[in-house]
Amino acid sequence: MEQPKKFKRIFLLVADSAGIGEEPDADKFNDVGSNTWAHAAESIGGLNVPNMEAMGIGELDDILGVKKVSDHPHAYCLRSRERSNGKDTMTGHWEMMGINTAKPFQTFTDTGFPKALIDELEEKTGHKIIGNYSSSGTEILKVLGEEQMRENSLIVYTSSDSVLQIAAHEGVTGLDELYRCCEIAREICMRPEYLVGRVIARPFVGTCAEDFKRVGAHRHDYTVSPTGITALDILKSNGYMVSAVGKINDIFNGVGITKTIHTATNEEGMDEAIRQLKEESWTGLCFVNLVEFDSEFGHRRNAPGYAACLEALDKRVGEFTKAMKEDDLLIITADHGNDPTFHGTDHTREKVPVLMYSPSFKNGRCLPEASTFAVMGDSILYNFNLKKDPSMLGGVISEIFED
């Protein structure tokens, strides 16, 4: 018997990197003891997140300041493990939509990029390459920005992510030239020995080290397409809207997306999610990435800042739920961990929370742990009477359809 469509619109909010405790195989990633939510809370003496607390986040782990609320009829909660072999943004988001990534993307955090890659990039772009090490994007501009302007060179750097970033001054190099060079880098980095998830254009403006500023609106990500069919493809091919907010379009290289809204901050992302919530003419999925947890606080090991970011999200969640209709579903989750108290600056191999809220729920409760992030994508397909491809990971969270 066909399952009737329960929800007209589903909103999937990804608090990028807000993991909730180490995975069973965390030892393979040197991440034993990591817990992004718990350690961020401890850094400020306890979190104040009443809206997510009322959805059961406290039932998923011991989080200082958060009560274990078992009576949450309008919300289901669970923790989910990651099946894929990795702990990066693309791997996590792709798995949510059904892809099992067996071989992780390459990182060059400790060594920089191989000389052969840099030499080829210089030859093909016609620019001298400077940098070639792991750094914060704002810090490397202070060190190398003036040199880049004098020479019209390219600042190449990486991070703990699988990424090659190229920074250049908008007024010296120009956006078109920066983008051309990034396209060359993307082509080179499609080879197996160099394969990184993203090449990112990082334009900046300013006159000297003291006032350089990155231009987020002109950032451009050159990614690889998903390695298989995703839930987004199936939704799109069946006529449903797939709205990508934040860096979702970049993560999926535009595949399976019908509408794209680029946002630079969590607040902008939530503003857009609430705007689409109030626009009632569509049916399908609004997929939102809230990047600042990861980029501004996790990688920079700013635990109090991370905690404040969780509290800020909670306020917006309260605003969001008040505007929801009976046939709306909100899912709040993460794509990996990035414990702001941990060693290094890398992501951490963690389980993620899954909070599911709808005004129509009457029997919300804490559910058993899921074995893959793909339960989210598969459940979204099931809601719209669609089936996953046999190649995809999955598993339907059946309780939310029985309520």
Image (cartoon, helix red, strand yellow):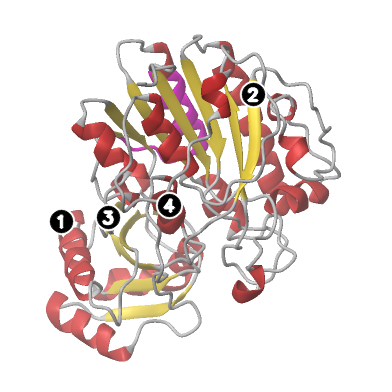
Q: Residue 212: in sight, yes or no?
A: no
Residue in the picture at 26% in, 50% down: 253
Residue 62 lies, in percent from the top left, at 82, 45
Secondary element under disc 1, as helix, strand or loop, is: helix
Task: Give the Cα distance between marks 4 and 3.
Answer: 11 Å
Q: Earlier in the sequence, mark 1 or mark 2?
A: 2
Q: Quadrant of residue 124?
A: bottom left
Residue 321 located within the stretch drawn in magenta: no
Task: Give the Cα distance between marks 1 and 4.
Answer: 34 Å
Q: Earlier in the sequence, mark 4 or mark 2?
A: 2
Is 167 left or right of 332, judged from the image as shown?
Answer: left
Task: Give the Cα distance between marks 3 and 2.
Answer: 32 Å
Query: Which mark is on residue 75?
Result: 2
Residue in the picture at 80% in, 28% down: 69
Residue under circle 4?
95
Q: Earlier in the sequence, mark 3 or mark 2?
A: 2
Query: Which mark is on residue 228?
Result: 3
Report if the CB atoms under discs 4 and 3 are less than 8 Å apart. Answer: no
Residue under circle 1?
176
Q: In the image shown, does 315 or 196 lie closer to the viewer?
A: 196
Report if the CB atoms under discs 1 and 4 are less than 8 Å apart. Answer: no
Q: Earlier in the sequence, mark 4 or mark 3?
A: 4
